[in-house]
Amino acid sequence: MTEPVPDLEEPQATRSPAARSTLPPMRLRRLAVMGSVISTILLVVNGMVCATWSHFSGIPGWLAWQVIPGSLAVAFIPTTILGFRYSNLLLRVVYAVSAAWIGTLNFLFFAAVACWIAAIPDGLAGWPLPRVDLGAILFGAAFLIAGYGVVNAMWLRVTRVTIPLPNLPEAWQGHTVALVTDLHLGHLSGPRFLRRVISRLRSLQPDAVLISGDMFDGTTLHIDYLVAPWRDYSAPRGIFYVTGNHDEFADRGIYLDAVKRTGIRVLHNEKVSVQDLQFVGVHDSEAGDPEELRRILRQAHLDPLRPSVLLAHRPVNLSVAEEEGISLQLSGHTHGGQVWPWNLLVSRIYGRFAHGLARLNKLQVYTSYGVGTWGPPLRVATKSEMVLIRFEKAC
């Protein structure tokens, strides 16, 4: 590892055009189109929520005062796109507030729906609970849940799991690795957040740290500053990293170079043996292509008599990993859906591999909720976690 460096002064703004993001214009145009669609949906949802609150609270003129929440909802998209090219305090504050509002809007929408469902019987005629009280209770509950979600997202937990591996070398018997995924450094989380994560790693004392993607949130601004705390930390048997989808929003070489400058070992679609345990790292683009993944795993020349651990950001193409003899795949990406009810949708998409330890024949897969958040800084029905994995020899 490189020598520890003192904390860097936080950059307040982009200093030169050379420091700006290299996000391709075509990618920016696609983001703009997608952003327009999402903004329209957010405006419709926001209007429905404001109209419901106006109706149930008896406050007139909802079209006038809903400008503020509507602006907050729509601001998320342009601040996200601008964040690829610019960095300043105002942009970060607006992004943070709008992201938090979108998370809150999720629960307010369901509160609004519940209000109208409850109002169906005779338009509340004869109900013991006045219309104003009904709205206050349901909308109040939504705000309380959102507040809990913010606090819950900031509370970093450690999930401990023991995983048996066939033919585990004696050097790894009873030893541990830490799975750290989805840090999403950038728009909301910075060096202070990363120092908290590293402080927890120091207390856990894993033999190795495995970072399976999304170290960054997507911006390429001040990325050396974002990852600088890694320079103060080392693990006895190494720290290993592969990219996630957010690490490939721009030229991934920009992110990889910054990570390498901290002393972390980047696994470029390759295998490395650490005391006879095989670690294979495949970047997200290649791991998402089943034929490319198969080609990389075959070129790695895995020893079938020794266990192998695959770092791949998404829990996909698992049959390929299983067929090529991988013992354990470590992934993230899903966030478990991050907030209700999206956790239910993610479970439908990824099935039993959405979170936790699962098995596909001889392949074991652990998918982490991740350390950080993307978009709304909330977690409801999930948690922010790093995973401490203890290896044992399979019977």
Image: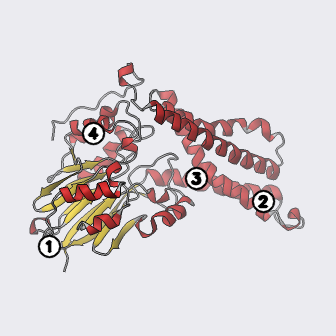
Q: Which of marks 4 and 2 is nearer the N terminus?
A: 2
Q: Which of marks 1 and 2 is nearer the N terminus?
A: 2
Which residue has dot 3 on it?
146
Q: Nearer the viewer's eye, disc 3 or disc 4?
A: 4
Residue pictured at 43% horizontal, 32% vertical: 24
Residue pictured at 78% horizontal, 57% vertical: 133
The answer to whether residue 205 shows anywhere in this view is no
Rendering coords of residue 163 (x, y %)? 26, 70
- 298 vs 353, left or right, is left
Q: Which of marks 3 and 4 is nearer the N terminus?
A: 3
Q: Nearer the viewer's eye, disc 1 or disc 2?
A: 1
Rendering coords of residue 205 (x, y %)? 21, 56
> How far is the residue under mark 1 from the one under mark 2?
60 Å
Circle 3: residue type:
Ala
> Eyeballing the image, is 273 above or below 228?
below
Which residue has dot 4 on it?
256
Disc 4 to disc 1: CB gap under 8 Å: no
